[in-house]
Amino acid sequence: MITTANTLLSNGVCGTTCNTTASRQLRTDQETVKNNLDALNNGASVIKAKPCAFKFYLLTY
């Protein structure tokens, strides 16, 4: 997510400056990343799209 935020704020994406006060797709994308980072910083849950392949085994003695 940090890489995405850095990419959206880079001069290569924004032009010479990243002052995206005008409403356009880049501003919408930046706002989405900001909202996601805010949510994570405030304790939001992170749910993986695909669960890991970990298996539990029953130990028998």
Image (spheres, rainbow, N blue to C red):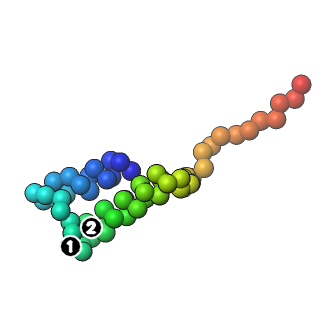
Q: Position of residue 1 (x, y in %)?
A: 39, 50
- Give the side of residue 34 with respect to residue 13, left or right: right
Q: Residues within 10 Å of mark 2 (few under 14, many from 20)?
A: some
Q: Where's the C terminus, which quadrant? A: top right
Question: Decide: marks 2, 1 in contact (CB < 8 A)?
Answer: yes
Mark 1 lies on residue? 22
Q: Position of residue 42 (x, y in %)?
A: 49, 54
Q: Residue shown at 46%/51% (left/top)?
A: 41
The local secondary structure at tag 2 comes to: helix
Mark 2 lies on residue? 27
How many marks overall?
2
- In whole angstroms, how far apart are the C-alphas of marks 2 and 1? 7 Å
Q: Residues within 10 Å of mark 1 (few under 14, many from 20)?
A: few
Amino acid on which the number 2 mark rests in the picture: Arg
Q: Residue shown at 60%/45% (left/top)?
A: 52
Q: Position of residue 4 (x, y in %)?
A: 33, 52
